[in-house]
């Protein structure tokens, strides 16, 4: 799906003020309320907008340590025969660990990159141990994030998508 200038402006309004409301957004942009509503529904249906939930800060909830873990996964031929890749089975297990914020299969030395949080450095060991306990995980390599230079973002892509 491609987005146009009006879609981008709508997304920018809601990104800046998620609780602004459709009517107020339409007033600010000088378009009909129905137009804004239809555009939001289309972008949601097409997966451009994935959610409207609150953006949470793990550190504010006591999870002050962020780390990135590269996992090596045993490639099990039985999993492939059953129609299931080994990384899918590992991802299912990682999904049960609340401190796992995201996981991506990757190319390179490791098979999966996982972003995790912990309450402290010693708690980080507990979380890493849970990852290592997942059936199929062979090895883990961890780096601790010292500071966030750029927070997760996609808004710059909105304007870039118009080019």
Image (cartoon, grey):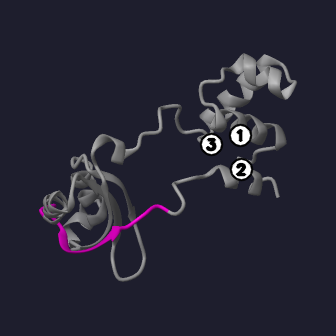
Instruction: Inspect this view and state whether residue 133 appears.
Output: yes
Q: Earlier in the sequence, mark 1 or mark 3?
A: 1
Quadrant of the image occupied by residue 109: bottom left
Relative to 6, is 86 on the left or the right?
Answer: left
* Mark 1 and mark 2: Cα distance apart in space: 8 Å
3 or 2: tag closer to the N-terminus: 3
Q: Is residue 56 above or below residue 2?
A: above
Of the numbered discs 1 and 2, the one sitting upstream in the chain is 1
Q: Is residue 106 left or right of residue 160?
A: left
Secondary structure beneath dot 2 equals helix
Q: Residues within 10 Å of mark 1 (few under 14, many from 20)?
A: some
Q: Measure how far apart labels 3 and 2 are at the Cα level.
A: 10 Å
* Percent position of residue 146, x then y: 38, 67
- Disc on res. 48: 3
Q: Can you give x and y, in whole percent of width and height, for residue 150 in the image?
A: 54, 60
Residue contact at pointers 1 and 2, CB within 8 angstroms: yes
Task: From the image, tell me which residue sits under label 2.
Answer: 158
| Left or right: where 45 falls relative to 99 | right
Q: Are marks 3 and 2 in contact (CB under 8 Å)?
A: no
Span shown in magenta: 133-148
Q: Secondary structure at mark 3?
A: loop
Q: Residue 1 placed where, x, y %?
A: 70, 47
Q: Which mark is residue 12?
A: 1
Residue neighbourhood size for the residue with mark 3, other residues' Cα within 10 Å, grouped as few (<14), some (14–19), many (≥20):
some
């Amino acid at each position: 799906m491609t987005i146009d200038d009006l879609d981008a402006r709508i997304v920018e309004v809601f990104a800046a003020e998620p609780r602004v409301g459709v009517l107020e957004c339409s007033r600010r942009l000088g378009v009909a309320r129905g137009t804004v509503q239809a555009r939001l529904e289309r972008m949601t249906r097409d997966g451009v907008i994935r959610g409207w939930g609150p953006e949470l800060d793990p550190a504010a909830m006591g999870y002050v340590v962020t780390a990135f873990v590269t996992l090596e996964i045993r490639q099990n031929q039985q999993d492939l025969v059953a129609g299931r890749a080994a990384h899918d089975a590992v991802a299912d297990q990682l999904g049960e660990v609340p401190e796992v914020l995201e996981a991506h299969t990757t190319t390179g030395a490791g098979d999966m990159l996982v972003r995790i949080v912990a309450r402290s450095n010693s708690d980080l060991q507990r979380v890493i141990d849970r990852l290592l306990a997942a059936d199929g995980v062979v090895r883990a390599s961890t780096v601790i994030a010292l500071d966030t230079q750029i927070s997760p973002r996609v808004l710059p892509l909105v304007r870039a998508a118009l080019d």
